[in-house]
């Protein structure tokens, strides 16, 4: 996924002739705290809500003010991972997208990005979640997929979290079923540490209780 595919066409940029009040109203309308200033196709920078609420005369044009204008942007072919990194590093609510002639193409809002990430991590899909703790030398997604698929299931999404000064990794798997006991048992049989399980149903047809009762009878 590239920046050009994430552009929101429903959020217009500001102009230097727009007033402070109009700028604040537009931020409130779209629930954002940054907006780009654009004249024709020229991107001039991002203005923040924090700067605008300090202005006493809200009828002033933003082009006449001395504001702390930010200048972050991405080119249209930047990958979504780099966009996420920019949002996180600069704590932005929007990121402008430019072509290679520095023409403004549109913006990506934090809401667009959140919707996209919820799709790639299959958040809306039915299924359960298994969190594994492994060493970085055992990070074989193909082997994990084989274990899951052996139980007639599939991995819908996955991600890996590393830890500073550690060879330990956490691998989170979203799986397209919620009865995970067989998959969990298989992971443990292959010496994976199952750290957490979410959205899992417990398959209980009375078999375990009958087994425990039988074992107790043998111990009498």
Image: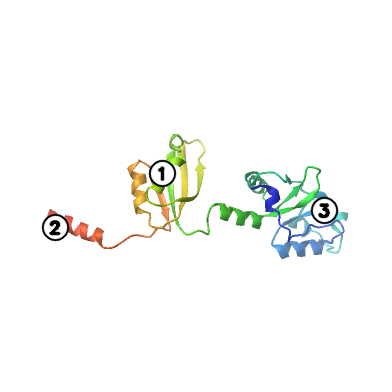
Residue 150, image x, y percentages: 37, 47
Residue named by callout 1: 146
Visible in this render: residue 209?
yes
Residue 54, image x, y percentages: 78, 58
**Residue at image coords 18%, 59%:** 213
State the SS at label 2: helix
Residue 68, image x, y percentages: 79, 49
**Residue at image coords 82%, 49%:** 44
Residue named by callout 2: 217
User: Local crowd at mark 3 within 10 Å, few (<14), some, or many (≥20)?
Assistant: some
State the SS at label 1: helix
Image position of 43 with respect to 202: above or below:
above
Residue named by callout 3: 38
Visible in this render: residue 68?
no
Q: Are the residues tagged 2 and 3 within 8 Å (C-beta)?
A: no
Name the side, left or right, on which 193 lies relative to 122.
left
């Amino acid at each position: 996924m590239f920046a050009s595919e994430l552009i929101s066409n429903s959020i217009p940029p500001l102009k230097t002739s727009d007033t402070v009040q109009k700028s604040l109203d537009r931020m409130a309308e779209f629930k954002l705290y940054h907006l780009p200033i654009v004249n024709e196709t020229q991107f001039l920078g991002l203005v923040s809500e924090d700067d605008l609420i300090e202005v006493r005369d809200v009828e002033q044009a933003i082009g006449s003010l001395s504001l702390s204008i930010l200048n972050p942007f991405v080119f249209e072919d930047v990958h979504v991972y780099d966009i996420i990194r920019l949002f996180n590093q600069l704590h932005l609510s929007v990121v402008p997208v430019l072509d290679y002639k520095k023409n403004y193409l549109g913006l990506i809002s934090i809401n667009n990005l959140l919707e996209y990430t919820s799709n790639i991590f299959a958040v809306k899909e039915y299924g359960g979640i298994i969190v594994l703790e492994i060493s970085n030398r055992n990070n074989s997604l193909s082997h994990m997929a084989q274990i899951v698929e052996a139980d007639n299931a599939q991995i819908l999404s996955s991600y890996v979290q590393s830890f500073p000064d550690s060879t330990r990794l956490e691998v989170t798997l979203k799986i397209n079923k919620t009865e995970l006991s067989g998959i969990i048992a298989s992971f443990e049989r292959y010496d994976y540490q199952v750290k957490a399980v979410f959205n899992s149903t417990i398959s209980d047809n009375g078999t375990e209780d009958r087994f425990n009762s039988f074992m107790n009878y043998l111990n009498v």
